[in-house]
Image: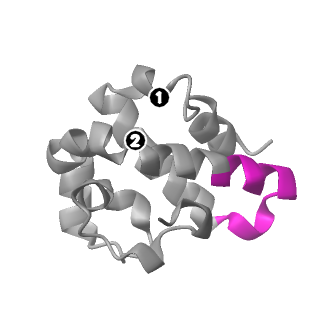
Amino acid sequence: MNKDVKIYTTTLTPEAIDDILVGETVSRKAFYRQEIAEHWDELTAEERALVAASDAVLIDAADKVAEFWRVDSVASIRERDQPPKEAWWWWLHEIAEGAFPAELLPKAARP
C-alpha cells in the first residue's frame, strides 16, 4: 500500500478522529493528502476507496480541526503557496465555517 495512503487513512476513522486533535498530527494530514492527490493515478481502487472514506471523516471533523488549520503550519503554507480550492484539504477552516464551495468537495462528502 502507498505509504502516504496508509499514514493518511490510519487515523482518519470515526473511532480515532478525536485522537488526531493535536496540531502537528492534524497539519500533517494536509501534506499527506497533497501527496496522495499528486499520485492519484498510481493508487489502486482499494487505496482510493480508503482515501475517500478518510476524506469524508476529515470533512465531517472540519469543525474540530479548524482551529489548527487557522494557526498551525498549514496556515503559513496555505498563505505562501496559495493552493487552489480544488485542494480542499488546505481549506478545512472554510469548510467548518460553511464558506467553502460545496461543489469542490469530494462527491461522497457533499451535503
Q: Find the residue positioned furthest to the right.
A: 45
Residue 105, position in %: x, y?
48, 69
Q: 6 above or below 111? A: above
Was residue 53 drawn as part of the magenta stretch in this picture? Answer: no
x 24%, y 47%: residue:
69
Q: Count neighbours of disc 2 (C-alpha within 10 A) and say few if under 14, some if 14 to 19, many if 20 or more.
A: some
Q: Main secondary structure of the magenta part?
A: helix
Q: Quadrant of residue 93?
A: bottom left
Q: Quadrant of residue 106?
A: bottom right
Q: 26 above or below 78? A: above
Residue 91, position in %: x, y?
31, 61
Residue 84, position in %: x, y?
36, 77
User: Which image quadrant: the N terminus?
Assistant: top right
The amino acid marked with disc number 2 is Ala
Res 72 label? none
Residue 6, position in %: x, y?
68, 37
Was residue 48 drawn as part of the magenta stretch in this picture? Answer: yes
Rendered image coloring scheme? one colour
**Tag 2 secondary structure:** loop
Apparent side of residue 52 relative to residue 67 in the rendered image (left or right) = right
The amino acid marked with disc number 1 is Ile
> Which residue range is magenta in the image?
39-52
Depth check: 20 or 74 in front? 20
x 55%, y 35%: residue:
12
Q: Count neighbours of disc 1 (C-alpha within 10 A) and say few if under 14, some if 14 to 19, many if 20 or more.
A: some
Q: State which tag comes first along the sequence, 1 or 2.
A: 1
Residue assigned mark 2: 61
x 35%, y 76%: residue:
101
Residue assigned mark 1: 17
Q: Are marks 1 and 2 in contact (CB under 8 Å)?
A: yes
